Amino acid sequence: MSENKKSPVSSTREGAVAIIRIDNPPVNPLSQAVREGLLREYEAAAADTGVKAIVLTGTGKAFSAGADITEFSSGRTAPFLTDVITTIEASAKPVVAGINGLALGGGFEIALGCHYRVAASAVRQLGLPEVKIGIIPGAGGTQRLPRLMGVEPALDIIVSGAPIDAAKALSLGVVDKVVEGDVVAAAVAFADDLIARGEGPRRTCQRTIDAAALPADLFAKKRAALARHPSGPLAARACVDAVEAAVTLPFAEGIKRERELILQCLPSPYAKALQYAFFAERQAGTIAGVGGDVKLRDVKSVGVLGAGTMGTGISLAFLQAGMPVTIVETKQEPLDKGGARIRETIEANVKRGRLTAEQGGAIAKNLTPSLDMQSLAGCDLVIEAVFESMAIKKEVFGKLDRICKPGAILASNTSTLDVDEIAQATTRPQDVLGLHFFSPANIMRLLEIVRGKATAVDALATAMALSKKINKVGVVSGVCFGFIGNRMLECYGEEVQAMLLEGATPADVDKALEAWGWAMGPLAVMDLAGIDVGWRIRKEHKFSDERIRLYRVTDAIADQGKFGQKTGAGYYKYEGRNRIEDPAVTAMFRAEAARQGIEPRNGIPAEEIVERTLLRLVNSGAEILDEGIAMRASDIDTVYINGYGFQAWRGGPMWQADAMGLAVVAERIKFYEGKYGERWKVAPLIEKLAKDGGTFAGLDKVKAGR
Ligand code: NAI
């Protein structure tokens, strides 16, 4: 240890008990220095004849949040966590974990390797979330947790990655005691008691599992339920394999198996994509040129205009974050309907146990419905979610300008209109921005924060901070038609229409894309959201002749009043939510293709469906990046993962393009350009990066000065 660098692990003594503390703010990640410090302090305590028992604890709000994920890329360095834990577990003196705060991943594994566990009652997060970044617990967690709490609950916790709280941990037998107040003092008292009673170590590794008592099909059933696990095709399966090894193999063999399995997961494209997505999401909150010195505006009360689909969802998002909301409509009926929908959702959350009745009541009380725009005068933020019409929006913003207090942020939830033009309807365009929520707004995590030409930096930074407060992922977008997500989706959707004309059926397209990883195929999505949405937009805005041509059949379907699920038919027919292929729709595409002189193909291979849709997204993403609409490629991926059902284990479209290699991407796009013409024109940024051997990720790094 160097003289001037304090070790993040230290120890003190209380009577015969040594207290080892991890102090590596903010959440005590297990960096190399921590692992080394733990071994050093443990060995000192082991060697000290005056020490009869050891307490291991964390400082601050965490016991330990686990591995230092920033060390993943730099490779493993000794001492390894597994060895640290094995050494502690082998201790001849009893070791008690004093779990003061969250213990996740490697942090939880340390606690499992201790002989006893005492936890503070306030601890909410104990668990093994490794599966969420595409790996499995790799320091004995998969072998010790089933031995401590039983195989079935351990399997659920490890496969889901979901944390449990202290009370649950006590009921499952993972912790021995839960205490109010000073957990370290309680752990020391626990240790003193062990000393007094002459109780020695109680090693988890020596516990046995009664395999015969388990349901015979436990693992098979669990595997069968993993088809669409959010970690992708590998990690969750590896978790099941590892826990099965805890049942079928002796401890030391099980540890070896765990090691083999984590080594399969670590280099997988899924783990890499999940870890990238994890960092991309955090990165999205950083806005170039907006430092920590920007003073945020105080937002304590929110106004929402319009109690339709979006207005009610947006209100719920703020109400659930504990903020008071005033919701304004022009007429009593939609106001009552919207208010009722909000209350029903809160009640449903109480019924499902997500909220206590008391919390539900407090949330509902925070809503003030009104027919008078004047009641928005005191709001710090007003979000407009009225009809999608420029004339109406301008009128509304003109009124808001006259009514709202100075400094209030005035936001529009528009999905297609020009935020700069809306801002011009006010005398304070610096306070205007777009807050583009996704439906259902109380559930979908994505929030596009649309930065107008005049939007003030502090208004933008405040919106970003608010997105976190309401548990959303905020991504900044510039002003353009469709912003980041929908503009790209237009290209994706257009290519889908082209393939339907060429001979793919809606089911071919949806099945291919769902099998690749999309949460839902594009035609099923359109049927769910309503085919009429795009149909109306195509009526109001000017689009290229090409797009109009490609959407001709879809518009004809909508002309027939088939809007999708809500009318019982769209691209598919519906029995409840079950989609059934509709030969009439296929026939419409065949007939239109014949009219347009498109040679019918005998179906389109799944790989081509995946490639064409993905490349259209990438090409459009590159244009958006080049125009400065998106700040970074990773923001585009964050948009797609959080708002469009692109699976995190696939990393996002831009990540996929980097994985293909941009030279290959450019070549494939040009191939399709040769075949289909203008709509496939390669984005200049892709050509440039391909020529220079660059990547989107590399470009992000250059921009961030990293
Ligand atoms: P909606 O038709 O369900 O609701 C609009 C509501 O605004 C109606 O209840 C109407 O009575 C009310 N309204 C109209 N003029 C008003 C005024 N001057 N003052 C107060 N209330 C007024 O529409 P929806 O779907 O909620 O859309 C609202 C906005 O959100 C639109 O700009 C839309 O483009 C945008 N959006 C919609 C999404 C969706 O999936 N539905 C997704 C993202 C954005």
Image (tube, grey):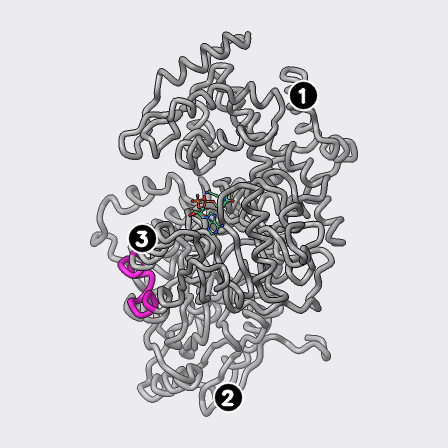
* In magenta segment, residue 694: no
List the single residue furthest toward the bottom.
15
Q: Residue at x 35, y 33 (%)?
A: 565
Which range is magenta? 348-361
Q: Residue 525 sits in which quadrant?
A: top left
Looking at the rendered structure, the kind of residue marked 2 is Arg
How far apart in space, not on screen, are marks 1 and 2 (Cα)?
75 Å
Q: Residue at x 38, y 74 (%)?
A: 117
505 lies left or right of 658 = left
> Callout 2 environment at 10 Å: few (<14), some (14 to 19), or many (20+)?
some
Residue 46 in the image: state x and y as whole percent: 50, 80
Identify whether 307 is placed above or below 109: above
The image quadrant where one finds the C terminus is: bottom right
409 lies left or right of 339 = right
Secondary element at tag 2:
strand
Are the two marked residues, 1 and 3, in contact with CB atoms closer than 8 angstroms? no
Residue 348 in the image: state x and y as whole percent: 29, 56
On residue 13, the disc is 2
How far apart in space, not on screen, are marks 1 and 3 (Cα)?
60 Å
Q: Nearer the viewer, residue 270 or 215?
A: 270
Q: Residue at x 66, y 19 (%)?
A: 671
On residue 678, the disc is 1
Main structural element of the magenta stretch: helix, strand or loop?
A: helix
Q: Is residue 134 visible?
A: no
Looking at the rendered structure, the kind of residue marked 1 is Glu
Q: Is residue 469 visible?
A: yes
The image quadrant where one finds the N terminus is: bottom right
List the single residue furthest toward the right.
692
Q: Residue at x 34, y 65 (%)?
A: 206
Which of pointers 1 and 2 lies earlier in the amino acid sequence?
Answer: 2
* In magenta segment, residue 352: yes
